[in-house]
Amino acid sequence: MRETALKLAAAASLLAGLTTGAVAQQKTVTIGVSIPAATHGWTGGVVYHAQEAAKQLEKTYPGLKVVVKTSPDGAAQANALEDLSAQKIDALVVLPFNSDELTNPVREVKKGGTFVTVVDRGLKDTSIQDIYVAGNNPEFGRVAGKYMADTLKTGNVVIFRGIPTVIDEERVTNFEKALEGSGVKVLDKQYANWNRDDAFRVMQDYLSKHPKIDAVWASDDDMALGVLEAVRQAKRDDIKFVLGGAGMKEMIKRVMDGDKMIPADVSYPPAMIATAMTVTAAHFFTNAPMRGTYVLNAQLITKGNAKDHYFPDSSF
Amino acid sequence: MTDTLLRTAAAKRMFNPDMRALSPFIALIVLAILGAVINPDFLTASNILNVVTRSAFIAIIAVGATFVISGGGLDLSVGSMAALVAGFTILTLNNGGAEISTLMLGALVAIGLGAACGLANGVIVTFGRIEPFIVTLGTMGIFRSLIIWLAAGGTITMRNADLRELYRPVYFGSIAGIPVPIVVFLAVAAIGAVILYKTAFGRHVIALGSNEDVARYSGVPIWRVRTLTYIIQGICVGIAVLVYVPRLGSATPTTGLLWELQAITAVVIGGTALRGGIGRIWGTVVGAIILELVANIMVLSNFVSEFLVGAVQGAIIIIAMLVQRSLQRGR
């Protein structure tokens, strides 16, 4: 779905680009992209999609140059931003490590007249950004909760939380809200740090503690993998399915193949960086208005649409 | 510091047990009772076996850490080392067919690479004359980055499903009703205990940890003993990885995160002195089980909010240490 939408957007902008480009001189634009280095699965996916999108966009818009820089932490990213603005970039696409540390460095870049697109983690001062592209965390929880309520009707579920953050809090509260009024009850919730090993450990303990669990909201694909091993070891058949999240290729593959334990997934696509880059490039090469806020849907991925979310070459 | 070695005659020790050596075991029993009171499911065989099996990685690594720490050193790199060794082992396994020989090759790579990493740590500490804290903090970063680079930020997974099934019993199987990881860590601890308590090398480690200058004047080959402790640590990491890989069949950049702190905590709970000179292998094993047990009790309890689990866990560990100390004073 999302990929086709992207392609459509790219195609539309290409057409627009051709018509205007034919009249105007071919212009040169440099877009700097600053993202976290691949330190875990999801950011690994961000790096992959940023590099893919850079190649695609440079092909689509002759005259466009895209520079992708990865940084291992917030301070390094602040330095990378200085390096990028020294290269005279026309636009900056940034997925900040954290809001507090990077608001000022991004503001400095903006002061030089650079067009700024912020992705996923918002800055403290929203007036800096020209475009904001983000995933939808409350929606992520709501979609998962609704799926549980619709599929189970009644039953008991256990929740795996990630790392204590605003993101995690938004997801979990909205998941629980979506269950309200349904026959689905939450037995337990614990932090497993978006980590496979921790999820394995917590699931083993859940299995000792609760004699009947109908479904598991692992809330993340890495954690779902740990959960599945623990369930398999305990040979418990009361668990009907495990619902992960994010859209890791191994899990999407299982959904595609019709794995009974993994009937669905909820997207939180690292490819949102590609969305941001595409929109930013379109701002320079088309006449369509692009400034604004783009919130990507957290989509329910089922057997029917799984292939649109499957990127076998990505590391994530 | 050498009190355990020289202070009391063997016969006297038998009637007057060393409370410092016993206190981790007492803490373990107290915790088990606490767990049973909190949730009756705690004492089911499956739960106890789960917990002890899970503690295997930390226990095996901590046996190695007992050598390093009682010899007056420190190794912060073990968690990253475990991740790197796991990554390399899986890559090796992915190159072979679903045969026992592939697994043997993987085992060789795991233990060889672990030993090599340990050797690097040991040589830099001894010949470079740099604080082990700094050296292993550096290698911790190096090993961690290498695994992230190898995995390109993603996951290194065992691709051959048949090989995975063949390897799976190493974590999930059992010998005479005892899960394999428990058998492995008991064997590692037994060998470690023999080396530390019964060999000249073991006594050299303790001597080195007690007082380096005295050890040097007494003719202990300082650099060799110290380097060997780091190699033993590396081999232990290799063995732990061999038990770890079949569980989830993958290594990620977050594999082994903070294992170094858990291993050091297990060693200290077990009664080994952080400043060196006293080493207790069996205490270390109990320490690792206690750590895992505390986490298990937290999940099984119904009255601790998930937001406060960390605080309660920390408090239990501190209280357990206070109880141990008071037992020692009370004798």
Image: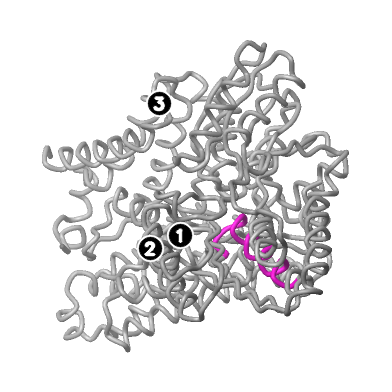
Quadrant for residue A187, please give it.
Answer: top right
Q: Secondary structure at mark 1?
A: helix
Residue B25 horizontal side relative to residue B142, left or right:
left
Give the mark toward the camera: 3 or 2. 3
Q: Quadrant of the C terminus of chain B?
A: top left
Residues shaded magenta: A38-55
Looking at the picture, how far across and down is residue B37, in whole percent?
39, 19
Query: Nearer the N terminus, badge 3 or badge 2?
Result: 2
Looking at the picture, how far across and down is residue A67, in whole percent?
60, 75
| CA distance for labels 1 and 3 | 31 Å
Residue B65's disc is: 2
Tag 1: residue type?
Answer: Ile
Q: Chain of mark 3?
A: B
| CA distance for labels 1 and 2 | 6 Å
Circle 1/circle 2 CB separation < 8 Å: yes
| Tag count | 3
- Name the residue located 52 percent from the left edge and 21 percent from the top edge: B41
Q: Which residue in the protein does label 3 denote?
A: B305
Tag 2: residue type?
Answer: Ala
Q: Is B244 located above or below residue B323 in the figure? A: below
